[in-house]
Amino acid sequence: MYQISKNMNINQMNVGNQPPRITAETVKQAKVFECTCGGKMFSEKMIIKKLSSLLSPTGREEMFPMNLLVCDSCGLVPKELDPDNMIPEEFKTK
């Protein structure tokens, strides 16, 4: 039998190996992400990356779009939003 604490609802229980569910209350308690410049609003932008024919699995030059979340205040992508370091440095906050 599962015991539920006073601060946990049935949807937040960790049953088996499943992670707890995110509820409306969980979202209300979450902090708003902030850019290093202090901005809290972001817009989706896109860059197009080119892959050389030497690196391409097809042997031909490839182009592919890459979506970014850009801070509306400073126009840059916070480094925290690029954990795999795939975005060119010129687009990222310092």
Image (cartoon, rainbow, N blue to C red):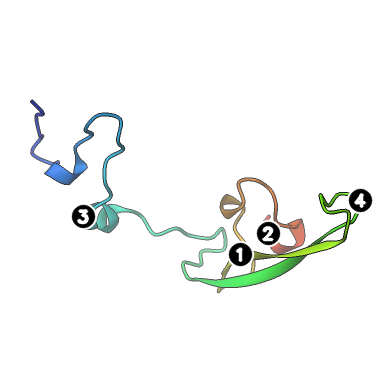
Q: Say which quadrant the C terminus sits in.
A: bottom right
Quick check: marks 2 and 3 in contact, CB under 8 Å?
no
In the rendered view, would you say 57 is above or below 19?
A: below
Q: Identify which amino acid the numbered label 3 is placed on.
A: Glu
Query: Disc 1 or 2, which lies upstream in sequence?
Result: 1
Mark in front: 2 vs 3: 3
Secondary structure, mark 4, is: loop
First in sequence, mark 3 or 1: give its number.
3
Of the residues under marks 2 and 3, which one precedes in the sequence? Answer: 3
CA–CA distance between discs 4 and 1?
A: 26 Å
| Residue on which the image places disc 4 | 54
Is residue 9 shown above or below 75? above
Identify the amino acid type marked 4.
Answer: Leu
Instruction: State which tag comes first along the sequence, 4 or 3.
Output: 3
Residue at 47% of width from left, 70% of height from top?
41
Q: CA distance from mark 4 to mark 2?
A: 27 Å
Q: Position of residue 31 (x, y in %)?
A: 36, 55
Q: Amino acid at mark 1?
A: Leu
- In the rendered image, residue 10, in percent from the top left (x then y), is placed at 13, 43
Mark 2 Cα shell of 10 Å, populated few (<14), some (14-19), many (≥20): some
Q: Nearer the viewer, mark 1 or mark 2?
A: 1
Q: In the rendered image, which quarter contains the N terminus?
A: top left
